[in-house]
């Protein structure tokens, strides 16, 4: 009970601050817009190997990649917590009896809400370009990227609390997220990749997310990729939340 | 006693290049703070004031020692300690994009206080600390003094029994400092025990009922400001005399109120318990013997003299 109340309290505060500074939301929308406008046409041509590629099909492949990319950015949440550490806000929270896990979860849930907002917007914006997707399929896809955000943002917060400096955080994040991003088949499906690259990519959990989201956008919720994505993401998210909570509880004893 | 600590210790390991060095930040601190007093921690940079406070506020786990704060055991029951204390960090704790009122309401709610009551408490605190005018502006627009007052209001929003203030006035201009002293006294009037740190001598002297002087992680002296100064050697009366200083000095051989006597070429330095009552005696003694007095000066010891006597260094230099 207290834990839920505390989580709600932290979440509310974070939402309030987010809405006050909508510049981040706007940046988060403009970026995928650039991709939709400037990159999607190029990709459509690249995918058009046998001359049968339609706009609808191209965006069903492209938009899922965008959603996973935006979700990947939630790993950068750690920068926010470093700023809060520096301002003394975290320490101020620590001297209260507030639940330590709530301090983490309230923040991560804010990130999930922000991501879902962006995901819905990117999807809607792609419709005039020719995207067609079922509502149920889209909702299930949003659940997948939502889980992914919970996983990555909580990990990002734990990382921020551990490293405690932007200078240490930036190289670590870039080094880790770049191969993950490339190996998730975000821009081009990995069907074009040589076998060894496919084998490596199989170890990237977010490649499975991309595949699952693509299957859903293609209107195949029964595809193996969908349950595989869920089966991989769910335990990983639980594990990440558990470990990050421990880091949180320990460093903010 | 509302705070009792015994042998509190903390050391940090820090890396300098390849070597790891251990800094013994706090080396056995025994403290007793009485309910309702303003207790001060005076010491130079790096003395271990913040480290001690952070331990008492449950933010740092002590390496050794015990503490009981407002009836709760720090090691066994930190959760209960948290409920009973407030803590204001040296570096502040407000978020640029929040308003003072939002910060206060949120902070109160983190102590489990309901929404309506939290709002009421915030409004009252804003009133008490003369912040009502700026309450709904973002914290980044506040002056240093206003921001510091929000910090203090945050520290007491849940009416704790004890409030720790880490350097409440550092960085404020003289007027804001005087203002802040008033606020701190208000806290005492509200029935709170205030434990603050400072490296200002005048602040320790004027504001604190009792204080402990800290240096290199240890307490070197403890008492009321007046007692501490008495302890050094009392007041000094210097008299410039015409003629032979030695002969004038002999006149005080049997004077019981003189603890110690020094002479320079032109002056007598008499260490006495209370300068104000000693001066008439001194004057009478000299006058009776016909010694001509060119000038007389009373020097009351400052806390700096106390620090000097205890550590061999001046607080101003260290
Ligand atoms: N987290 C830490 N890691 C390593 N060393 C630390 C840490 N915190 C404090 N110290 C060291 O412990 C010693 C005591 O520091 P502390 O902050 O308690 O001093 P202080 O009396 O509050 O000083 P100031 O008046 O400058 O605030 C210093 O030598 C400091 O460098
Ligand atoms: Mg300090």
Image (spheres, coloured by chain):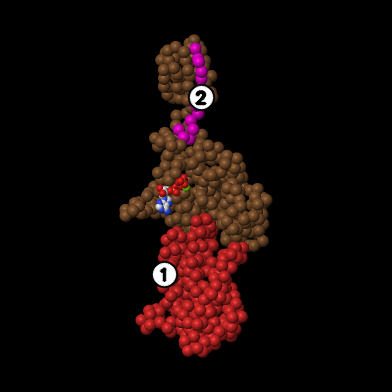
Chain colours: A red, B brown
Foreground: disc 2 or disc 1: 1
In space, the residues marked 2 and 1 are separated at their CA atoms by 71 Å
Q: Are discs 2 and 1 less than 8 Å apart at CB?
A: no
Number of numbered callouts drawn? 2
Residue A77 placed where, x, y %?
50, 66
Q: Residue, x 55% and y 37% (percent of image)?
A: B206
* Residue of label 1: A176
Which residue appears at 44% of the width and 65% of the height? Answer: A159
Q: Does dot 2 land on a helix, a strand or a loop?
A: strand
Q: Position of residue A67 (x, y in %)?
A: 52, 76
Q: Chain of mark 1?
A: A
- Residue B186 is inside the magenta segment: no
Crowd around label 1: few <14 · some 14–19 · many ≥20 (10 Å): few
**The one of B308 and B283 positioned closer to us in this rendering:** B308
Is residue A4 shown left or right of residue B251?
right
Residue B137: quarter of image: bottom right
Residue B157 visible in the shown view: no
Residue B263 picture location, percent across and down? 41, 20
Determine the chain carrying the residue at label 2: B
Q: Relative to the observer, which residue lies in front, B154 or B272?
A: B154
Q: Residue at x 35, y 54 (%)?
A: B15
Q: Is residue B80 above or below residue A131?
A: above
Q: Which residue is mark 2?
A: B298
**B194, above or below A4, in the image:** above
Task: Please provide the residue range marked out in magenta.
Answer: B292-305
């Amino acid at each position: 009970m207290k834990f839920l109340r505390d989580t709600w309290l932290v979440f509310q505060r974070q939402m309030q601050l987010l809405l006050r500074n909508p510049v981040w939301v706007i940046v988060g929308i403009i970026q995928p817009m650039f991709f939709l406008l400037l990159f999607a046409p190029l990709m459509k041509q690249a995918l058009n190997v046998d001359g049968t590629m339609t706009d609808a099909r191209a965006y069903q492949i492209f938009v899922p990649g965008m959603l996973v990319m935006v979700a990947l950015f939630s790993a950068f949440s750690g920068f926010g917590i470093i700023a809060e550490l520096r301002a003394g806000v975290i320490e101020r929270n620590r001297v209260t009896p507030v639940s330590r896990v709530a301090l983490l979860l309230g923040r991560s849930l804010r990130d999930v809400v922000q991501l879902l907002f962006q995901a819905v917007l990117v999807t809607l914006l792609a419709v005039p370009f020719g995207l067609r997707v079922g509502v149920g399929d889209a909702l299930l896809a949003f659940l997948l990227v939502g889980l992914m955000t919970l996983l990555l943002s909580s990990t990002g917060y734990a990382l921020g609390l551990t490293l405690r400096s932007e200078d240490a955080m930036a190289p670590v994040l870039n080094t880790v997220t770049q191969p993950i991003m490339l190996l998730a088949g975000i821009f081009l499906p990995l069907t074009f990749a040589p076998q060894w690259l496919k084998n490596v990519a199989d170890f990237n959990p977010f490649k499975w997310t991309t595949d699952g989201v693509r299957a859903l956008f293609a209107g195949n919720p029964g595809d193996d990729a969908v349950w595989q994505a869920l089966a991989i993401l769910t335990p990983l998210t639980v594990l990440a939340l558990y470990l990050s909570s421990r880091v949180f509880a320990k460093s903010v004893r | 006693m509302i705070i009792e600590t015994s042998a509190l210790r903390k050391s940090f390991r820090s890396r300098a290049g390849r070597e790891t060095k251990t800094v013994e930040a706090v080396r056995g601190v025994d403290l007793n703070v009485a309910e309702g007093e303003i207790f001060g921690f005076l010491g130079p940079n790096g003395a271990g004031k913040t480290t001690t406070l952070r331990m008492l506020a449950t933010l740092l786990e002590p390496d050794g020692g015990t503490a009981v704060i407002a009836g709760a055991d720090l090691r066994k029951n930190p959760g209960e300690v948290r409920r009973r204390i407030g803590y204001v960090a040296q570096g502040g704790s407000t978020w640029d994009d929040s308003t003072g009122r939002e910060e206060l309401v949120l902070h109160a709610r983190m102590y489990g206080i309901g929404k309506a009551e939290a709002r009421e408490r915030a409004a009252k605190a804003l009133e008490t600390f003369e912040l009502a005018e700026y309450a709904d502006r973002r914290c980044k627009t506040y002056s240093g003094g206003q921001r510091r007052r929000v910090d203090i209001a945050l520290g007491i929003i849940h009416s704790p029994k004890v409030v720790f203030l880490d350097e409440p006035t550092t960085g404020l201009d003289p007027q804001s400092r005087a203002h802040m002293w008033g606020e701190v006294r208000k806290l005492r009037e509200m029935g709170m025990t205030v434990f603050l740190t400072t490296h200002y001598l005048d602040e320790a002297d004027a504001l604190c009922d009792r204080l402990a002087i800290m240096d290199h992680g240890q307490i070197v002296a403890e008492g009321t400001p007046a007692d501490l100064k008495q302890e050094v050697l009392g007041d000094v009366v210097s008299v410039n005399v015409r003629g032979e200083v030695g002969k004038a000095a002999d006149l005080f051989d049997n004077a019981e109120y003189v603890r110690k006597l020094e002479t320079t070429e032109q002056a007598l330095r008499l260490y006495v318990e209370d300068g104000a009552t000693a001066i008439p005696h001194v004057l009478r003694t000299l006058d009776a013997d016909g010694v001509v007095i060119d000038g007389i000066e009373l020097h009351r010891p400052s806390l700096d003299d106390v620090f000097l006597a205890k550590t061999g260094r001046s607080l101003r230099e260290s």
